[in-house]
Image: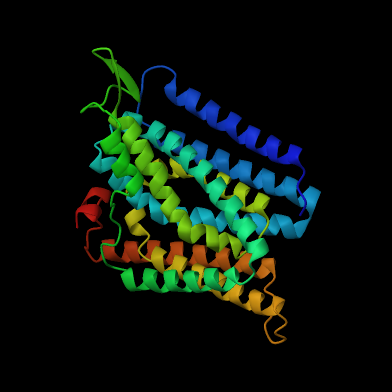
């Protein structure tokens, strides 16, 4: 799909306007906790926005492009749910006040979106020049799928400071405590950053590490950089509110890693088959986007329903489901 420059500008500009409006709502008045009602409204708003965008894409570019967008969006959103555990650990480790957590997520994910945009541009250019990278991406996704299954039931969700975060903590003079929601303050004539900026860097750079499996996954569904970017953008925009909406329900999704592993494995096989097909291997079929979308959607529905059913059985048997903090502490 050939996308004119004005379409890129319109989409990126529209996303920035929505995010700026979101940030204005967060900052106006006294800081306060994000309620479940607000979280539910905003999750619905961003999902609706993605559906509308997909509909416009269908009308202007056709059903295939729209199907690729929806498949990529669902995949990115599904993979992001598993990453919310790590966001919770980061918030706890840095003792972020609940009234400021939404702003931290908003700015941190905005940073991640910029970095993902660079990653996507580089990936699209590389794949266009080096077709053999599809085999590497496919093998990597299969490896990631196996790792998800092997780690199921273990405490694999942990947070280790990355190089960028370690550098920021050493190089940036910072205060010991939070100063409201400010990221920069002036103390004795010197400008210091607050822990707010440090935790925003932690969220943004950690999300970029998550992109190491999610970006190859969506490139397995489409090589169109415009669709890859917009699917990532809409998934990230709704991720903040999903963090507050799901809250303690996350640990009930006990089969999530299995579902994500199956999706990554499916896309990995799809990548390899399509690379073989493009190389002239007659027996290697092309997997239609309609099949990909169906597999991804059905897998997430079955995973969610099976997880909730197991949670209910555990409750009836008297096995207490741990709270989020208990789940993280072992």
| Image quarter (top left, top right, bottom left or bottom right) of the C terminus | bottom left
Residue drawn at the location 62% of the way across and 41% of the way down: 49
In the rendered image, the vertical position of residue 28 relative to residue 322, given as above or below: above
Q: Is residue 249 visible?
A: no
Which residue appears farthest toward the top when viewing the image? 189
Residue at image x 56%, y 70%?
267
* 6 on left or right of 51: right
Seen from the viewer's position, the closer of residues 148 and 2 is: 2
Query: In the figure, residue 4 lies in which quadrant?
Result: top right
Asked whether 101 or 138 is in front, the reply is 138
Residue at left offset 63%, top offset 63%: 127
**Residue 84: x %, y % from top left:** 38, 50
The quadrant in which residue 68 appears is bottom right
Q: Quadrant of residue 189?
A: top left
- Relative to 155, is 212 on the left or the right? right
Q: As displayed, is residue 7 above or below residue 207? A: above
User: Does 320 sit above or below residue 52?
Assistant: below
Residue 187: percent from left, percent from top: 25, 15
Count of numbered marks: 0
In the rendered view, tell whether residue 25 sits above or below residue 226.
above
Q: Is residue 221 left or right of residue 56?
A: left
Q: Is residue 21 visible?
A: yes
**How is the structure coloured here?**
rainbow
Residue positioned 54% across, 62% down in the render:
216
Quadrant (top left, top right, bottom left, bottom right) of the N terminus: bottom right
**Percent x, y of residue 254:** 35, 63
322 or 265: nearer the viewer = 265
Please state the horizontal and vertical placement of residue 126, each as a whole percent of the image. 61, 60
């Amino acid at each position: 799909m050939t996308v004119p420059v004005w379409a890129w500008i319109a989409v990126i500009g529209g996303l920035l306007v929505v995010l700026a409006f979101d940030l204005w709502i967060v900052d106006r008045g006294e800081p306060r906790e994000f309620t479940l009602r607000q979280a539910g409204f905003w999750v619905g708003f961003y999902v609706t926005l993605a559906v509308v965008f997909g509909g416009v894409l269908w009308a202007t570019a056709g059903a295939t492009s729209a199907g690729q967008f929806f498949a990529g969006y669902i995949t990115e959103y599904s993979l992001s749910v598993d990453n919310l555990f790590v966001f919770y650990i980061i918030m706890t480790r840095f003792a972020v006040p609940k009234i400021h957590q939404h702003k931290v997520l908003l700015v941190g994910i905005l940073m991640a979106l910029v970095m993902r945009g660079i990653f996507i541009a580089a990936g699209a250019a590389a794949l266009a020049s080096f077709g053999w990278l599809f085999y590497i991406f496919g093998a990597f996704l299969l490896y990631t799928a196996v790792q998800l299954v092997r780690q199921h039931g273990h405490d694999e969700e942990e947070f280790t400071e990355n190089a960028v975060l370690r550098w920021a903590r050493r190089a940036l003079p910072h205060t010991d405590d939070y100063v409201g929601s400010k990221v920069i303050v002036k103390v004795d004539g010197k400008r210091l950053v607050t822990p707010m900026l440090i935790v925003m860097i932690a969220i943004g750079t950690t999300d970029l590490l998550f992109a190491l499996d999610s970006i190859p996954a969506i490139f397995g569904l489409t090589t169109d950089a415009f669709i890859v970017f917009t699917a990532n953008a809409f998934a990230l925009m709704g991720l903040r509110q999903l963090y507050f909406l799901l809250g303690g329900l996350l640990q009930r999704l006990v089969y999530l890693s299995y579902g994500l592993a199956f999706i990554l494995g499916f896309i990995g096989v799809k990548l390899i088959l399509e690379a073989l097909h493009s190389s002239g291997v007659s027996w290697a079929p092309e997997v239609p986007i309609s099949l990909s979308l169906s597999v991804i959607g059905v897998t997430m529905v079955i995973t969610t329903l099976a997880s909730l059913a197991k949670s209910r059985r555990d409750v009836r048997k008297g096995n207490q489901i741990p709270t989020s903090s208990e789940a993280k502490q072992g």
